[in-house]
Image (tube, rainbow, N blue to C red):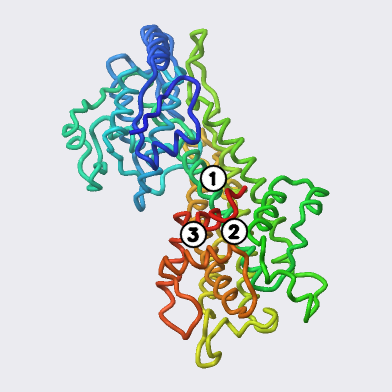
């Protein structure tokens, strides 16, 4: 099995995906263990002094003014975990929790948190054992870290609370740890706080969303090309020289992908022979501009994610010169903003895809296709209600595009009086990505049917490859009305698991 080694300088996005989704094992580097031990010596030295140090010998948040005597400090660390494990609502997905745990371990291994090496090793042991703490939807304001989600993870390290085992069954964490021979940790000074205080949940969801959107944006180039072809549109607008004079890299990549998919088509530009159009509608002609802007938004989001992956997010932090200093690096604003920005781009990509689908179904704008792509319009309704479903999804995408990061709600007796709401931004983006997949599946379903209805005209080789693969996947072609939901579900799976891209790339080679 693949092993990810965690050192002091952060991890990569591919490391996060390998652990969160691929089940990769985690190993601490010798460098990380040494850095953990060195930072812990600093914390132990400060704990022995009479001077109060935040997180070591004081309360937390609005209660930081109280000095905690040595005999109560272990209880203080246990209590912060127990009291902060206050999440509510549905369980968060397994890959999100694994990303959350792994990214917290990444910061712990930086040597800036003061956590003992054995605590970090126990965090790795839980991941390697496939033990996933039960984390709930609500409980993070995206400031002072993803507090409740991280607290539920820390609770499992202590052998408390519930967790899901490798068999998918939820049991008491103590039972799962005992079954794997993992000793629960006894937290000491600073450790409880260090386990809770990071942007790890929102960052993990950002990294996974970027991976999913990389696939979906390439898929959207394919479905847009199919719709252009089915509508007898012109591919002249995809010429590289046109995109070179407005040099946005995402736009150029999307146009190049569409052009590659349409290479060899006998449908594109056919309207110029018998029903001239000066130019295609915006939803067709401007597809590279809209998808390209989303791609460039993703590039900015990756830059933010990479910076966070190289960061040590905690409060207070242990500095190399021996100081333990309070700071505000736990504020989630940098991550929250790009999560919201991506949700806007996703909504717009879904919106333009729906407009192309609607055009395919409207006999007044489809340039010769039957109404709703029906077999016998009037007797058959065709894809009328498939577009309704797609429209409902797009409307939801627009609601999900409302920025969470524009909100803030005070907490902790006004000590934490401005928060990022980054966790909420991440949760809604996750839903948006899921719904975008469905939107593109409906466009794919409509566009492939429309291409097949263009009798006597030869589609591009890449289009034929998609249609053949889609039919092999159980998605039926044109014909009388039938139970449509199974076809749409199969089309959704075809986009979601990458078979759409795989079919296209057998002809085009890797898309950009």
> Quick one: SS at disc 3?
helix
Q: Secondary structure at mark 1?
A: helix
Q: In this image, 145 relative to 353: left or right?
A: left
**Residue 478, image x, y percentages:** 51, 80
The foreground one among 19 and 406 is 19
Q: Position of residue 328 (x, y in %)?
A: 55, 28
Of the numbered discs 1 and 3, the one sitting upstream in the chain is: 1
Tell whether label 3 touches label 1 (CB within 8 Å): no
Q: Which residue is mark 1?
A: 210
Residue 495 numbered tag: 3
The image quarter in which residue 146 lies:
top left
Does 350 appear above or below 16? below
Judge left or right: residue 35 versus residue 326.
left
Q: Is residue 467 above or below residue 296?
A: below
Q: Nearer the viewer, residue 421 or 51?
A: 421
Look at the numbered discs 3 and 2 and tell me whether their residues touch, using CB distance below 8 Å.
no
User: Is 426 in front, or is 4?
Assistant: 4
Whichever of callouts 3 and 2 sits on the residue coming sooner in the sequence is: 2
Separation of marks 1 and 2 at Cα, in angstroms: 15 Å
Of the pair 454 and 79, the residue shown nearer to us: 454
Q: Answer few, some or many: residues within 10 Å of disc 3's Cα (few below 14, many 20 plus, some between 14 and 19).
A: many
Left of 310 or right of it: where is 488? left
Taking the spot 49% from the left edge, 59% from the top edge, the residue there is 495
> In x, y percent, where is residue 79?
31, 30
**Quick check: 497 above or below 248?**
below
Lower position in the chain sequence, tag 1 or tag 2: 1
Q: Which mark is residue 220?
A: 2
Query: Separation of disc 1 and disc 3 at Cα?
Result: 16 Å
Label 1: how many Cα within 10 Å (few below 14, some 14–19, many 20+): many
């Amino acid at each position: 099995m693949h092993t990810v080694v965690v050192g002091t300088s952060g991890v990569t996005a591919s490391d996060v995906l390998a652990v969160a989704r691929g089940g990769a094992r985690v190993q601490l580097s010798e460098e990380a263990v040494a850095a953990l031990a060195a930072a812990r010596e600093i914390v132990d030295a400060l704990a022995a002094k009479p001077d109060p140090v935040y997180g070591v010998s004081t309360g937390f948040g609005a209660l930081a003014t109280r000095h905690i005597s040595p005999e109560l400090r272990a209880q203080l660390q246990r209590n912060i975990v127990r009291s902060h494990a206050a999440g509510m609502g549905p369980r968060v997905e397994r890959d999100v929790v694994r990303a959350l745990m792994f990214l917290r371990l990444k910061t712990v291994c930086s040597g800036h948190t003061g956590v003992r090496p054995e605590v970090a090793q126990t965090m790795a042991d839980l991941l390697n054992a496939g033990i996933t703490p039960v984390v709930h939807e609500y409980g993070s304001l995206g400031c002072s870290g993803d507090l409740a989600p991280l607290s539920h993870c820390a609770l499992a390290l202590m052998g408390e609370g519930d967790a899901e085992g490798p068999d998918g069954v939820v049991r008491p964490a103590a039972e799962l740890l005992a079954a794997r021979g993992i000793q629960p940790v006894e937290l000491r000074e600073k450790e409880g706080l260090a386990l809770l205080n990071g942007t790890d949940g929102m960052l993990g969801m950002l990294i996974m969303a970027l991976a999913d959107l990389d696939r979906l944006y390439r898929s959207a180039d394919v479905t847009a090309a199919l719709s252009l072809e089915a509508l007898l549109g012109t591919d002249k607008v995809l010429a590289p020289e046109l995109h070179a004079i407005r040099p946005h890299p995402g736009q150029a990549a999307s146009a190049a992908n569409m052009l590659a998919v349409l290479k060899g088509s006998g449908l594109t530009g056919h309207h110029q022979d018998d029903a001239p159009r000066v130019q295609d509608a915006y939803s067709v002609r401007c597809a590279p501009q809209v998808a390209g802007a989303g791609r460039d938004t993703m590039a900015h989001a990756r830059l933010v994610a990479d910076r966070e992956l190289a960061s040590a997010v905690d409060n207070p932090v242990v500095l190399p010169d021996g100081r333990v200093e309070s700071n505000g690096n736990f504020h989630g604003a940098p991550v929250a903003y790009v999560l919201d920005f991506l949700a806007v781009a996703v909504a717009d990509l879904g919106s333009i895809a729906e407009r192309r689908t609607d055009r395919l179904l409207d006999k007044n704008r489809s340039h010769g296709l039957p109404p709703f792509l029906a077999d016998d319009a009037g007797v058959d309704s065709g894809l009328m209600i498939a577009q309704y479903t797609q429209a409902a999804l797009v409307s939801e995408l627009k609601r999900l595009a409302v920025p969470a990061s524009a909100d803030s709600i005070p907490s902790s007796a006004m000590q934490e009086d401005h928060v990022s709401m980054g966790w909420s931004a991440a949760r809604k983006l996750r839903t948006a990505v899921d719904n975008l997949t469905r939107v593109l599946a409906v466009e794919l379903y409509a566009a492939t049917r429309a291409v097949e209805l263009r009798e006597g005209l030869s589609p591009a080789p890449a289009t034929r490859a998609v249609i053949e693969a889609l039919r092999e996947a159980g998605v039926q072609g044109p014909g009388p009305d039938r139970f449509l939901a199974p076809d749409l579900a199969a089309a959704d799976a075809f986009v979601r698991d990458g078979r759409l891209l795989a079919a296209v790339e057998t002809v085009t080679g890797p898309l950009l």
